[in-house]
Image: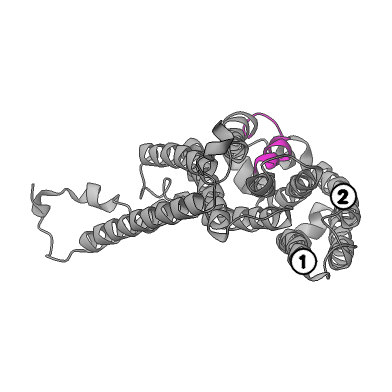
Amino acid sequence: MSLRPTHEIHNRRFGRNLGLGLVLVAFVALVFGLTIVKVTGGDFQMPKAEELN
Amino acid sequence: MTDASIPTQATAGEAGFGDYFALLKPRVMALVVFTAFAGLLAAPGSVHPLVGFCAILFIAVGGGASGALNMWWDADIDRIMRRTRNRPIPSGRVQEGEALSLGLALSGFAVVMLALATNILAGALLAFTIFFYVVVYSMWLKRSTPQNIVIGGLAGAFPPLIGWVAVTGEMAMEPWLMVALTFMWTPPHFWALALFMRSDYDDAGVPMLTVTHGRRATRVHILVYTILLALLAVGMGFTSLGGPLYLSVAVVLNALFLLGAVRIWRRDETDAEADNFATERRFFRLSLLYLFLHFGAILAEAVLRPYGLGGWA
């Protein structure tokens, strides 16, 4: 049995790949945003030199 | 291999993106998001909006992951019950192993990301919630005791606590009251469902109260739990979570809910069958509104508080 060039299964696969791609892009953007917030918010601030002494 | 050689049976079972999303039980996730958001906003202190968004997102993903694991474990009874027959696994769109892999991967991902985005305690609570729902409820209690949904309901009650801890990093009494509200709400909500979806649980051999102790006992249990729930819900109005708005909402809703429970208690099976369980169905629909409006009122009190309008002060 042959499949048409744009069989329904191709649409389903495309939808699945597109969905996963968008989720991954959103995750990268989220981690980037979270990193900026954490770094600028002082969560990972280095101790001041005078506090070390 | 070309497309021409793909056997038709394999293609028929190929899942779309929506099928994997359906494994995460989106409707349960919506409840998780809403109650966790209420806990997050009601907590003293504040977090950056993006951190708050991430906290809610990862709590929702964790809830969804436990839903996928629950569907993997319960695939055999989901095939029997009319209500669950069209879920991705029983309908053949997703393989059981795929659901297991997705559930495990998302569980680990959600816990680690929540801990990194907020704090370790919030991550640990999410891990415990997933464990409780999958192992304690799905694997152990659901098929062994009629108290399954009473104790298992605790897993669904945790999100507001996780939301609170994501902000404060520590426990307090108020989020536990929110946990108790959902915990006490779950039994009457599910028992009402069991009364009118009666053949489903019987056929699947799930020991719901309706099956093990009879339908009369279930009606009595609904009334008793509703009385206890009403006392708790109205009492919460006098804590720091409450205020005039919450108390007004709680008094009206609990009066309606109690009335519904009394009506269910007074009916017998002949009455119920005569009108196709209209009272039980109405009570079930009201229970959805009940929880939504209680947490909505907690949310409103928290949002209004900075403007001097929320709470009792």
Q: Residues within 10 Å of mark 1 (few under 14, many from 20)?
A: few
Q: Which residue is mark 1?
A: B306
Residue range highlighted in magenta: B142-155
Residue occupying the point 69% across, 36% down: B148
Is B150 one of the magenta-colored residues?
Answer: yes
Chain letter behind tag 1: B
Please provide percent x and percent y for residue B102.
Answer: 40, 42
Residue toward you, B116 or B247: B116
User: Quick one: quadrant of the C terminus of chain A?
Assistant: top right
Q: At which x and y percent is residue B96?
A: 39, 39
- Which amino acid, by three-letter code, is at mark 1? Pro
- Give the quadrant of the N terminus of chain A: bottom left
Q: Is residue B107 magenta?
A: no
The local secondary structure at tag 1 comes to helix
- Say which residue label 2 marks: B232
Identify which residue, B196 or B261, lies in the foreground. Answer: B261
* Picture layout, residue B291 above or below residue A47: below
The kind of residue tagged 2 is Leu
- Distance between the Cα atoms at labels 2 and 1? 26 Å
Say which label, 2 or 1, has the lower sequence index.
2
Q: Quadrant of residue B35?
A: bottom right
Nearer to us of marks 2 and 1 is 1
Q: Secondary structure at mark 2?
A: helix
Q: Is residue B96 left or right of residue B110?
A: left
Q: Which mark is residue B208?
A: none
Q: Residue at x 23, y 59 (%)?
A: A9
